[in-house]
Structure formats: structure tokens, C-alpha cells
Amino acid sequence: MDASGTGTRDARVAALLLSVLAAAAAAMVFQVYGAADGLDPVDYIRSGLILLSTWWLAWGAAQALLGLTARHRVTTHSTAPILGRSVVLVPVYNEDPRVTFARVAAMDASLAAIGDPAVVDFAILSDTRSEVIAAQETAWFAHLLADRGGAGRMFYRRRVLNTGRKAGNIEDFITTSGAAWDYAVILDADSLMDGATVLEMIRRTEADPRLGLLQTLPRVVRARSRFGRAMQFSAGFHSLIFARGQAAMQGRTGPFWGHNAIIRIRAFAESCGLPELPGRPPFGGPILSHDYVEAALLARAGWTVRLDTDLDGSFEEGPENIVDHAKRDRRWCQGNLQHSKLLFAPGLKLWSRFVFFQGIFAYIAPVFWLAFMLASVAAVFWAHPPDYFPQENWPIPVFPVDQRSKAVGLAVGIFGLLILPKLAIGITAIWNGRGPGFGGALLALRSVLAELALSTIVAPVLLAFQTRSVMQVVLGRDGGWPPNNRGDGSLTLDEAWVAARWITWWGLLSLTSAHWLAPSLTLWLLPVTLPMILSPWIIQITSQTSRARVFTVPEELALPDILARHDAVLARWPDTIPA
């Protein structure tokens, strides 16, 4: 759908209108509640914070509603011969080379099994800093070539300097070697993509001469822990609907998530050179969240950036515990806040600027909620005792109207914005027959309710991590680009305590202060402060392996071919080879 078409424009207007109206209604209800004892400056501040925070929740709900109601874009599946040359790029940074290179072997085998004569090569682009791991990469690459007979089709290079990190890695390859190919499928080290999906992406790109980037919706797989499997279920069950809503709004100015996507190399080379931002990190230096910027630059140059949610066979892995999730999220936080320097960059499309704004707001929204709670405690000092005799010489007392029902209604409404979209997606999925893929309608519904319960418990812990990340960036602390942890993510209680003890102290201090200064708020704050106090135990318990049937996903019921091929390669390859 064209970004200038009425469908995309109507979707954007509808989402903005619904979210703004919901936020305004929440702020007005709070104003009425605050007026019960007389409006004061803190009430106006709290109303503003409610407006901003509720808008973000309502925006997500509107996106889900669009995803449930938007008409699916029909994509013609072409069987025409592929004319261009393609390369699959696999950037690595201190990864386990055995597992990563086995993914390349599996994808190559998947392509070979189809027998399509299209040219699809592989390039492993190493930014590894460890000399030990680099030596292992060289040995495992030789093993990969011997296993797949890939000489001339598979390439490996390691950069001396990892300037620009992953974005610089891709840019270095495109500027030095990209002219040899027409298209590049960009993956992460933990990505897997079925050969049929790779070929379909290439055909769709060739069919649209203005298509500069085509993004798939990756499915999370291989999760074992309670936290990981809950996130895996949510990604498989809910994300499809949210992504359809996002695609309806973005049209030709779509997203790039940095991996599991195909680019037209000429378009990328002409449009996506990334400068270093002025100043020192965290706001200056290399752009960390480069993918959103590259999508905006492609759109600025007139290229289509599209999200096709119907493309199956695209997979990735996710964090297995809250601590690893928070470490990755810290990098995303810094990268998104860097976009504040790009909001007014010349020539960008208005929607691209709004995408930057969304990314920034996603991280400062938790700060608004924290500020609202602090302002609510401070409001006690501004509160006025009720005036039972507002009219002079009137002997009968006038009792103020009890407005607590409005506070309860507001809390229920805000909580509803969090849970109703997922419940609606669950009911619709069962109605439309998606339930069997998640273990049947009953198990799917149980999984939806369990994921809602777990996310409610975990949310205050994630809020604390996100708030700290924002504060660190604002105070000038550079988080860098730490490598992702793969494999077993189980944590001991001691490890969880070290990682989250500060959250426990925050929770205890907040609850104690609120109970001392504003006892009436104690019960209201318990849903937030209690998980914070218990955060080490929550982190430890959710990091443990779970074999429960809840959170079942289709990939567990029927192992996709590309995952089976990866397992077969790992079973065939030795555990170690001499470096």
C-alpha cells in the first residue's frame, strides 16, 4: 500500500485520533478526581503525566486494533527465474562459531534442496575482538567449506577495527565488495531463514524495482526458560497482529529491524551512509539504533521500505532471562535516545520523524509513570482539607462528592489498555482457527492468560531497568555494545540478587516513603513496589527451564525444516576442532 494512499493515511489518522482521545479522556477524568479537594499545581502536573503515559498505552492498543481489522495485503507469488545475484550476510561479534556457522550450513543445505539455479552466496562478517574466538572462527570456516563444498560461494573476513559496530560492518562490506551482488539478505548471528523464504524475498524485490528493503517478521524459537518461552509465545501469538497494524500505518515507509530482511544493494549504497553524530557518547558517536535510520534514509531517497507479515520461515532467538533482556534493552535505549539529534534532519519524510519520536517515547514513557507516582506522593502536601461550609452564614454542612469511583475507573481503564488488546487477539485467533498451532484453543487461551499474568508481574522490574537506562544516558554514561549471551540463561539467586538488589532497595524505599507520607496510596502502589522488592526472586525463577505445556508455539509442535537442518548439522559436526 502506497504511503500516500488513502488506506495508509486513514490508518495513521485513526490510530492517532483514537490514542489522543483515550489519553485526553484519562486526563480529564483525573482532573475531575483531583478537583474533589481543590485543584493545585501538582494536580495539573499529574494530569499532564497521565495524558502522556496513557497516550503511549493507547497507541499500542490502537495498533493492535488496526492489525485485527486491516485488510491483508495480497502479494503475488512469482515463479519467474531470479536474474540478480544475492548474498546472505551474517555479522558476528564474539559468538560461538560452531553454532553460528552451522546455521550457515543449514541455510545453504535448505537452498540446495530446492534446486533453484539462483546465485545465493554467504558472507560471514566478523567483528570479533577475542583472538581466541577469532582463531576458532577461522578453523570452523574451513570446516564449513569442507562440509558444504562452499569454496567460491562462502566468504569470511574479520575486520581489524570494528568502526561503527554492526552498521559499520555492513557498510564496510557493501563499500568494498557489494558491487558483486544485487541483493543482500541481512541476518543476525542467531538468525535462521528457510531457503524458500530467501528465494521468495529475492523474487519480491525483483518484482518491484522501487523496493529498497523488505522486512520479514521473525519468529522467536529455541526458548527454554519461563521468561524466554513467555516472550517466544507473545512474539508468535501477538506480534503478528501488532505487525499488521504497523504495516497498515507505515505503507511504503516501513521499518527495518536490522536483521532478517533483504536490501537492494544499490539503493542501500546510495542512501544509507551513516555519519557519526556530533559530540561524545552516549548521544554522540556511532549510531547504535542504525536500522531505523537506514529505513528513514531509504524512504528519503524515494525507495520503498516494506514489512511483509505473510513471509514465513524467518527465525531468531531471544534472551532467556530478564537481565540479558535488560542488557540488550540498554543498548536500544541509548540508540533510540540518540535519534533526538535526527528528528529534524533535512529531507526526512514526516512519518520517519514520527517513528523516531515513537522510539524515543518508548523509553521515556516509564519515566513519566515514575514521575506520576512521585507526584502523587507529593500531592499530599498540597491537599486542602474539605470546606464543609463554603457559603458564609449557611448553617447546613456541604459534604464533597466522593470521587474515588473515578480513580478506580481510571485505573481499570488504563489497565484495560494493557490487557484488552491481547485478550482480543487471543479470542480472535481462536475464532479464526489459529488455536491448534498453539496447542489447541483451550491451551492457547491459558497461555494468553498466563502471559498476561507474568508480564504484569515482570513489568515493574522492566520499568526499573528502563528508567535506570534513561537516567544513565541522560547523565552521559555510554553503555557501548555488549555481546549477546546465547544458550543457557538460568541464573542463581545470588546472580539475580547482584543484578537487581538496587531494584529491591528502590521498591522498599518507595513503599516505606509512600506509607509514611501518604498512607492512602500504599495499596495503590503495591502492584508496582511488591514486584520490585521481589525482583531477584522473580528474575531467578523466570530464568529457569520450563517444560510446562503452557506457552506452546507451532515450532514446538512441528519443527520447521530449517531448524531440523540446523540440529542435524550440529549433531554431525564435532564439538571442537583444533584452532
Image (cartoon, rainbow, N blue to C red):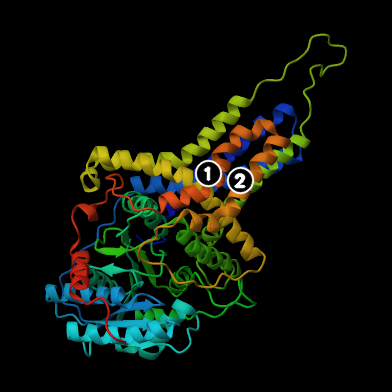
Residue nearest the viewer, comparing 218 with 222: 222
Is residue 58 left or right of 469 when viewed as pictured?
left
Q: Which residue is label 2 attached to?
A: 507
Where, by quadrant of the figure, is residue 211 drawn? bottom left
**CA gap, disc 1 to disc 2?**
8 Å
The answer to whether mark 1 and mark 2 are in CB contact below 8 A is yes
Where, by quadrant of the figure, is residue 434 drawn? top left
Residue nearest the viewer, comparing 48 with 475: 475
Q: Is residue 230 above or below residue 412?
A: below
- Residue 289 location, x and y as percent? 49, 69
How crowded pointer 1 is (Cα within 10 Å; few <14, some 14-19, many 20+) is rated as many
How crowded pointer 2 is (Cα within 10 Å; few <14, some 14-19, many 20+) is rated as many
Residue 15 appears in the picture as rendered: no
Give the residue at x 44% y 77%: 166
Q: Which residue is label 1 attached to?
A: 531
Q: SS of the residue at dot 1?
A: helix
